[in-house]
């Protein structure tokens, strides 16, 4: 994991959001929905360092909880719809927002790991 003069520095936010390689910005970071490749197909960056852990799920929980709970409370206080209508609206919306945010947030966290050279502490 190192910066290479052949590749200009990439923004970890745009490369991570779009699931691109954090070094070259052209290769793909993921093989499936959330599975990280072993290495980039363009610059051959070894992506085994990538371990976002629970980070994306934590951020999704915080963002989606704040956003959707706020929206549900606003709708309930303003329009007072029946509970079945709230569930009909907010259950699929919650799934869409949570699942939709997972991959970009995982990509951003992995790109930030690469950018900041974050790794496990080691005794020399
Ligand atoms: Zn690459």
Image (cartoon, helix red, strand yellow):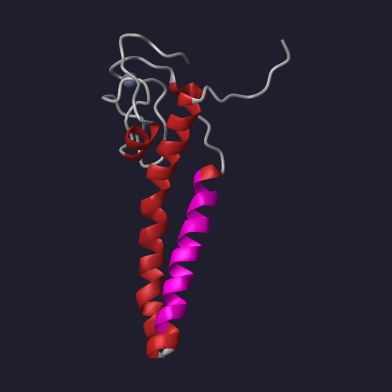
Residue 72: within the magenta? yes
Ligand 1 shown in quarter? top left
Residue 76 x/y as whole percent: 43, 85
6 or 91, nearer to the observer: 6
- Magenta span: chief secondary structure: helix
Q: Which residues are drawn in magenta?
A: 56-75
Residue found at x 35% / y 14%: 44
- The answer to which quarter of the image holds residue 79 is bottom left
Residue 87 x/y as whole percent: 41, 79
Residue found at x 36% / y 53%: 100
- Check the picture and name the quadrant holding the C terminus: top right
Residue 70 as seen in the image, left or right of residue 25 = right
13 or 20, nearer to the observer: 13
- The answer to which quarter of the image holds residue 22 is top left
- The answer to which quarter of the image holds residue 7 is top left
Residue 57: within the magenta? yes
- As drawn, 119 above or below 6: below
Q: Is residue 27 visible in the rendered structure shown here?
A: yes
Residue found at x 38% / y 59%: 97
């Amino acid at each position: 994991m190192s910066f290479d003069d052949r590749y200009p520095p990439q923004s970890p936010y745009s490369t991570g959001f779009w699931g691109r390689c954090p070094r070259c910005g052209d290769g793909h970071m993921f093989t499936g929905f959330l599975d990280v490749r072993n290495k980039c197909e363009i610059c051959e960056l070894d992506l085994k360092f990538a371990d976002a852990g629970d980070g994306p799920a934590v951020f999704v929980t915080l963002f989606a909880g704040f956003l959707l709970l706020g929206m549900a409370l606003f709708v309930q206080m303003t329009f007072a719809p029946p509970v079945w209508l709230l569930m009909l609206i907010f259950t699929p919306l919650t799934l869409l927002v949570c699942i939709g945010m997972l991959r970009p947030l995982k990509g951003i966290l992995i790109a930030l790991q690469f950018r900041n050279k974050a790794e496990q502490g080691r005794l020399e």
